[in-house]
Image: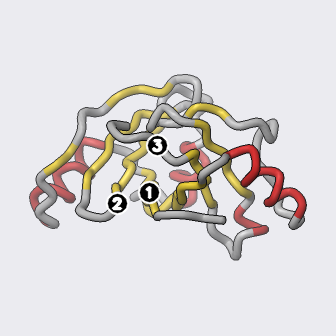
Amino acid sequence: MIGNLNHVGVATPSIEDSVKLYRDVLGATKIGEKFSMPEQGVWVCFVDLPNAQIELIEPYGDDSPIHGFLKHNPAGGQHHICFEVDDIIEARDEMKAKGARILGTGEPRIGAHGVPIIFVHPKDMGGVLIELMQKPEAGH
């Protein structure tokens, strides 16, 4: 069911500081602009790699779900991994049929790539928060 690894989500208290790390220490050369996603409570910035992306996420607002993560991991760290799927509804239904819990309402929402996403509970995924995203079309 899962396709390509699309990105690894990294929670950070400061996207600007994290960009410096990926650029100055690791040598990343393709780094997008920081943008807000208030409906998800995050600031986002993508670091493009040859085979995937790093999604830097920083809290946006007091209700950001990233605050809880950073409370336990003040320096930040790996938050989730994201795989592409051909059909998000089919993937959601298959996950539920296999006993995995979908976070939130269970309905897909639009993610940072502009396509529908869901998150699968880490307790059902070996301790890893899994994001499934509808495969983006060319240009996304």
Tell me the number on the disc at residue 96. Answer: none
Q: Quadrant of residue 44?
A: top left
Q: Residue at x 48, y 30 (%)?
A: 60
Q: Which sits earlier in the primary sequence, circle 2 or circle 1?
A: 1
**Taking 20 as reference, is 1 left or right?**
right
Task: Out of 107 and 103, give the one closest to the viewer.
Answer: 107
Scheme of colours in the image: secondary structure
Q: To which residue does mark 2 refer?
A: 52
Q: To which residue does mark 3 refer?
A: 136
Q: Residue at x 78, y 68 (%)?
A: 124
Sort mark 2 into few (<14), some (14-19) or many (20+) by Cα contacts within 10 Å: some
Q: CA distance from mark 2 to mark 1?
A: 5 Å
- Counting the numbered discs, the total is 3
Viewer-side label of 1, 3:
3
Q: Residue at x 16, y 51 (%)?
A: 20
Q: CA distance from mark 3 to mark 2?
A: 13 Å
**Taking 69 as reference, is 32 left or right?**
left
113 vs 98: above or below: above
Asked whether the beta carbons under mark 2 and mark 1 sit within 8 Å of each other, the answer is yes
Residue 53 rendering spot, x and y as whole percentages: 34, 55
Quadrant of the rendering where the N terminus is positioned: bottom right
Under tag 3, what secondary structure?
loop
**Taking 43 as reference, is 110 left or right?**
right
Report the amino acid beneath label 3: Pro
Asked whether the beta carbons under mark 1 and mark 3 sit within 8 Å of each other, the answer is yes
Tell me the number on the disc at residue 6. Answer: 1
Q: CA distance from mark 1 to mark 3?
A: 10 Å
Under tag 2, what secondary structure?
loop
14 vs 132: above or below: above
